[in-house]
Image (tube, coloured by chain):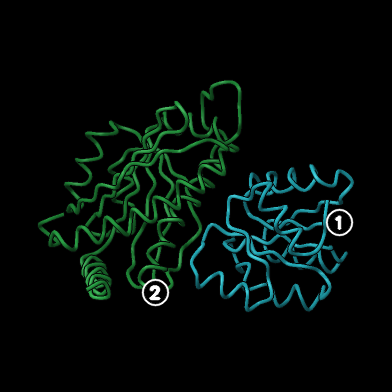
Amino acid sequence: MTSYFTPEESDAFTEIFNIGAGKAAMALSELLDAPIVFSVPFCVVLPLDEAVDYFRRRFGANICVVSQDFSGPFDGSALLMFHEASSLALAQAVLHSEEPIAAITELEREALTEIGNIILNACLSSFGDVLEREVATSLPRFLAGPSGAMLRGARGFDVVLVVKVDFSVEGREIEGYVTFVLNVDSVSAFRDAANRLLGTLH
Amino acid sequence: MIRSVLIVDDSRLARMMVAGLILDRWPNARIREAENADQALVAVAHETPDLVILDHSMPGESGLDVVAKLRASAPEADVALVTANIQSSIRQRASDAGCHFVAKPVTAEKIDKLLADIGIAP
């Protein structure tokens, strides 16, 4: 993130996302009725092509994504990205299924979409509250397919703010990434908002 | 005692979860479901529920968009706005519209608090 933001701005971003991750952890814990551990967010801004490579290296060919467009102080798309194995484990947890789930059918899609809705809204709501500007969000969409297509399909923006948040669900290893796809103007607006936040703290 | 609840949410899973929590408390409650604002208005016009549990983010009109029409059709029904969008501004708009506010996911504790706020004890 240092090529786009100063260390102080990066620190402000991480704190904003940390607040969002905390809210998401609480909501997910309520949904699954199980303790959730979220890592401290790791943030990096990458050009779209580099982001495609980044996720291809980590996810391989196919991923599952819940995406939500947002607008207000800045415009973009928020994506919650999972390995397929993590998606199946998460759907099993939310549906309280005794048996492992082998494939994503309609109910599993709905379960994952609702999880995405809750996690992404927790993050986006924290932006709105911290920055004192309302962030409007679209309905969540569930998609499965190649990671590159997922990112390139996210409204054609040119910069990706990757916020890596690992979380685990009571013994189940489930890794998820929360990612924000923005255009350059929105990254600037994000930076301005972080600086306003820093200004209020000084 | 609650007799009739209308659950409005485009997510079938969300409707199933809320219905289960209500029926755990009142097994004889009449649960009706609507997937969107239009269906909710038809359901309310047909029969006034005691409580409307209304999702905010839905295709078409949002929960907050439809509250005034629901109130016009069923002024005596309590309305609870349910949403994962937990921004202060949304909470304030819900309050301004006279709605109770429930953050998703809906849990047993949140349903109990909602019912206590409304003045209905299981």
Q: Chain of mark 2?
A: A
* Few, some or many residues within 10 Å of mark 1 (<14, 14–19, 20+): some
- Image quarter in which the C terminus of chain A is found: bottom left
Query: What kind of element bears circle 1?
Result: loop
Q: Chain B is which colour?
A: cyan
For badge 2, the amino acid type reads Glu
Which chain is green in the picture? A
Which residue matches tag 2?
A: A132
Q: Residue at x 23, y 70 (%)?
A: A198
Q: Which x, y percent locates residue B39?
A: 74, 62
Residue A119 falls left or right of residue B97: left
Residue A33 falls left or right of residue B44: left
Q: Residue at x 69, y 49 (%)?
A: B15
Which residue matches tag 1?
A: B2
As displayed, is residue B7 above or below residue A150? below
For badge 1, the amino acid type reads Ile
As displayed, is residue B42 above or below residue B103? below
As displayed, is residue B7 above or below residue A166? below
Q: Chain of mark 1?
A: B
